[in-house]
Amino acid sequence: MRDIVFTRSSGWIPTVISVDGRLKLMLGAGADANHEPRTFTFPIKEAHLAVIREDLPRHLLLWSAVLPLCDAAGTAGRLDEDAAAALLDPVLLSSPEKVDALFRRIRWDRSRLVAHGADIDLLERGQVCAAMGAATETPNEKRAQEHHADRRRAQRGAVLGPLDAAILRYTGQYAHGATVPRRMPDAVDAALLPEVMRVIATAEQACAGMRIDIDPRRGRRAADKRDWNLVATTVDSAVRRAHPGLVDDAVRTVSFLMCSETSDRSRSTPVEDDAEDADDRAGLGGGASKTALTFTDDKGAEKKWLRNGRRSASAEFWEFVGDRSAADNEVFTIEDEEMGEGIQLHFYADSIARITTVREGKGRSDPEYRVEYSLVDGLSDYRNLVNAFVRGGCSALEPHGPWMSDVAEFERARRRRATSGP
C-alpha cells in the first residue's frame, strides 16, 4: 500500500511516499517507449524526510542531482537506486561547502534549479547552495528555457546585446529558434521597443512587394525555396547595412519573420495561374489555347481538363501536382491527345521534355514521336512553360529553349549544370 507522506505544491518536485511502512522518494522523469511519463522511487530515511520538509533549496538540489540518473535509465531501464541513495547524505545533510564540492564532481540538472529561482551568476561560479537562497516552489519554465538558449549561444560564441535580445523576444524566438516567428511587442521592454520597430521597418521596406509562392512540387502548402531565399537574402542585406551592430541571431529572426509573413500573404493572394484565361480576356492568343488536356503522374493517376470548366488548365494542373507530388512521384505529364503533343516535367532533374507526334501509328506500325529536352530554372520557369504549352502547344515553347533532341547532349548539359550550379 502506498501513501503520500509529503508533497509540495508543484507536482513535479519529488514526493515522499510510504510503501508498506518504508519511506521512498518518488519522482517523474523521462518517458517510456510509448511516450508516457516514467516514475522512479528509491528509499530514504527519516532524517532525509526532515530536511526535505523544511529546506526547499536542499530538496531542489537533490532533485537536480537525481534527474541525470533517471535520464540514464532511458525508456525501459531501472534506476540505479544505490547511486541515488548515495546522494542523500551529501546533498541533504552535508555543509554548503561540501554540497558545492559534490556538484563540481557529478552531473546535475541545471534547468530545474534555474526554473525554481536559482541565481544564475552564483550557479556559474559553482556556489549552488548560495544560488538557491531565493528558491521558489513554483517554477518559471520560460526562465529556464531562456537560460538554456543563452548557454547554447555562448557555446558557439554568440553574445546578445540588449537590442539583439529584444528583437528575439519580439519574434518569440529567444528561447526556441525553430518556432515560427510572430510579432510580440508586449514581450519587449518599452524603452527598447522603438529601436526594435526601426529594425522591423527596415526589413519591411526591403521586401515590400515580394512574393513567396507555394511550390506544388513539394505539396499544397510548401513554400518555394527560391522565393524564400530571395526574400531572406534581401532582408538580411538591408538590415545588416542599416543596423550593423546586430548579431547574426537577431538578423536571422527578422529575416525569418519577414519570410513567414510574406509567405502567408502570398497564400491569401495566389499566383495568377490563369495566364491563358487572362490572355483571352485581353484579346490575345485567340483560339490557340487548348480545349482538352490530360494530366498524369508517374504512379498512373490521371485527370481530365476541359476548357468549359470554371478553372484554367494551369491552375488545375498545379493543383494535381500539389496533391500527388512526392519523393517517389516527380514526373508529371500534360497531354493534348487531339493534337498529338504533350510535355513531361521531370522535377527530380529540373528538366522538361516536349513530345510531338511525327507520324500516327497505322496497322501494326507504332507511332513516331519527336522528343526534345530542355533544362528548367526553378518553379517560375516551370510555370511559364506550362502556361506557354496551354496557350499554344509545343510550338509556343520554342522561345523557351534551347531544346535538345540528342539525349547524350542533354545529359552532358545536365552534368555541366550540376557541377557549375544553376
Image: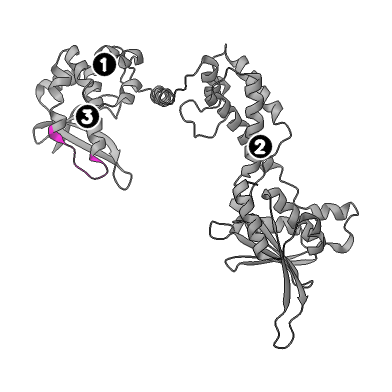
- Which region shows up in magenta? 73-82
> For the residues marked 1 and 2, what is the alpha-carbon distance in whole angstroms?
48 Å
Distance from label 1 to label 3 (Cα)?
Answer: 15 Å
Q: Nearer the viewer, mark 2 or mark 3?
A: 2
Which residue is found at the position 63% from the left and 52% from the top?
A: 416
Give SS at disc 2: helix
Q: Which residue is mark 1?
A: 128
Secondary structure at badge 3 equals helix
Residue 111 belongs to the span the image colors magenta: no
Task: Pinpoint residue 351: horizontal percent, then vertical percent.
Answer: 66, 57
Q: Dividing the picture into quarters, in which one does residue 114 lie?
A: top left
- Is residue 207 visible from the viewing direction of this image? yes
Question: Dot 2 corresponds to which residue?
Answer: 230
Quadrant location, the N terminus: top left
Q: Residue at x 72, y 42 (%)?
A: 269
Lower sequence index among marks 1 and 3: 3
Q: Which residue is mark 3?
A: 66
Work out whether mark 1 precedes mark 2 in sequence or the reverse, and give the earlier one.
1
Q: Residue at x 67, y 49 (%)?
A: 378
Dot 2 or dot 3, earlier in sequence = 3
Left or right position of 177 against 10: right
Q: Is residue 245 above or below residue 108?
A: above
